Amino acid sequence: MNADATPHVLYRHELEPRWRDLDAFNHVNNSNFLTYLEEARIQWFASLRKPWVTEAFAPLLAAVHINYKRPVPYPSRLAVELFAEKVGTTSVTLGHRITDAATGELHADGHVVMVWIDRASGKPVALPESIREFTEPPSGP
Amino acid sequence: MNADATPHVLYRHELEPRWRDLDAFNHVNNSNFLTYLEEARIQWFASLRKPWVTEAFAPLLAAVHINYKRPVPYPSRLAVELFAEKVGTTSVTLGHRITDAATGELHADGHVVMVWIDRASGKPVALPESIREFTEPPSGP
Amino acid sequence: MNADATPHVLYRHELEPRWRDLDAFNHVNNSNFLTYLEEARIQWFASLRKPWVTEAFAPLLAAVHINYKRPVPYPSRLAVELFAEKVGTTSVTLGHRITDAATGELHADGHVVMVWIDRASGKPVALPESIREFTEPPSGP
Amino acid sequence: MNADATPHVLYRHELEPRWRDLDAFNHVNNSNFLTYLEEARIQWFASLRKPWVTEAFAPLLAAVHINYKRPVPYPSRLAVELFAEKVGTTSVTLGHRITDAATGELHADGHVVMVWIDRASGKPVALPESIREFTEPPSGP
């Protein structure tokens, strides 16, 4: 990633893998990367201090892409960073990077596409205001 | 997916989500889809009856892409189907589909890129013979 | 366990461990036994075809005891059996056994204590009728 | 627990539940308590800086008992404390308490029985020196 092109970090969350995240190959299992990303997203949503899940609507993952670059050791401390890659009317594409919290070494990158749905109908609804506000680039000069 | 273009199914594995796979939104959590795909791959590897993991080498996920099409209900019975999308020297791209085992309704599709690594050095090695044999298209007349 | 003393089996559920249930010691992890027991309980509750969780009340584990007798291999097929050990006004003690579904070899036994709580107050409530009916021994001649 | 009777804390580990630890009842699932306890044990073993798992031997859970006292909220920060309750030749009974890291409020207590086994034969072996040293009470005056 070109430093000049590095998008603005929306949120950075640090967490520690658990021994149980290791699988029989003694690696942090590939599915746990999704859990680490989810944890960062949820903590980010909560940090916005505006509704992101209600009786009426809830977020849903529409797609995920992860490039596994380097196995995650145990014990370790990771940083999960989220970026706004694309903001639409009913969906947002969040880039992500999982790095070693101390060295910045890259373990994985990629992105997810999120939508918000009406919990009764299951249909997509407009992005919550809080998500739109924080992911949209500031308007020009 | 055009029926004409449907690739050959390498393996089909049926499994049942567990109640614990549900998250606080009462949906099967997005990370479990990776576990279902992994289960199908491991059962497929085992079915080949040739070495796919040894003291010397082991498979590793290089990338994953999942499109979440429809939430998975609990209880339910799923079918995970694997396809060979691309076979390289040191990597194989496996397409996947997760459907309702009875109705065929699509819950998710996508693909993974797998490599095999030397467990000591962490470097990629040639695909195991068993994987190459079963994923390569038969040569023509 | 003396055959004469074997309590009545309330429910028997068969399930298959997943590769992801293995931990870095290449054993099915101890925490998964709780998930297997939970799966059997949930399937049992559902089989009673009367409310066991509503807007008003929900089950909660008050205590668990597991004796790990023999590691669970992968792949394998397990049977989880549930027994009524003690039925109180607001709690029920369910015995459990996890065995190999084919050979009957014992992997784990023990029991859980379950209560039902008022979801608003968090206070214990009387056992749902369906649970009481099915766990109480039939009255004598 | 009477303060006078409080046994010596062998190890105290703090950790944060993840959103994925919640289940469909919006509670931290009962099985995750085992994962939290395991994490504290593993970190404790590692802190002893003497072998606790080798090619020859590995620890195994023989039994677990947990009393669930109070649901764990998300987000939260927990403290897991381990105590030596009983030290035998081939087994050790470790008491445990899971509390709120800030307030000390009790979420769960209980104990586990651990053994070390010969990895080849599966038979119990003598406790590793490091475990015996740290769990045995200091000899008299």
Image: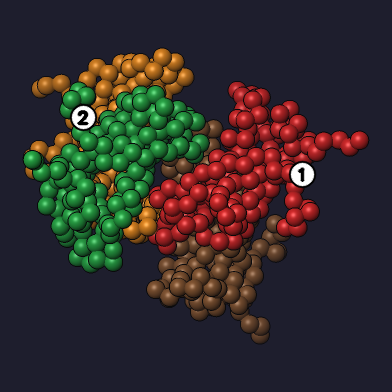
Chain colours: A brown, B red, C green, D orange
Q: Relative to D131, is D122 on the left or the right? A: right
The amino acid beneath tag 2 is Thr
The residue carrying mark 2 is C6
Q: Position of residue B11 (x, y in %)?
A: 65, 39
In this rendered view, identify the residue nearer to me: C90 or A114: C90
Task: Answer with the quarter of the image where residue A86 lies.
Answer: bottom right
* Horizontal side of residue C97 vs D2, given as left or right: right
Q: Quadrant of the N terminus of chain C?
A: top left
Labels 2 and 1 positioned on one and the same chain: no
Labels 2, 1: front one: 2
Dot 1 crowding, Cα within 10 Å, few <14, some 14–19, many 20+ = some
Which residue ends up furthest to the right in the rendered image? B141
Residue D136 visible (yes or no): no
Residue displayed at 77% across by 40% down: B87
- Secondary-structure class at tag 1: strand
Query: Disc 1 sits on a residue from what chain?
Result: B
What residue is rendered at 62% in x and 30% in y? B47
Q: Secondary structure at mark 2?
A: loop
Q: Quadrant of the C terminus of chain C?
A: top left
Q: State the residue at coordinates (28%, 47%).
A: D79
Where residue B43 appears, as percent x and y from the top left, is: 58, 35
| Depth order, front residue of C25/B31 | B31
Q: Is residue A122 left or right of residue B98?
A: left
Mark 1 belongs to which amino acid? Lys
Front residue of A108 and A115: A115
Residue B61 spot, x, y in % from top left = 63, 42
Q: Position of residue A16 (x, y in %)?
A: 45, 47
Q: Which residue is mark 1?
A: B86
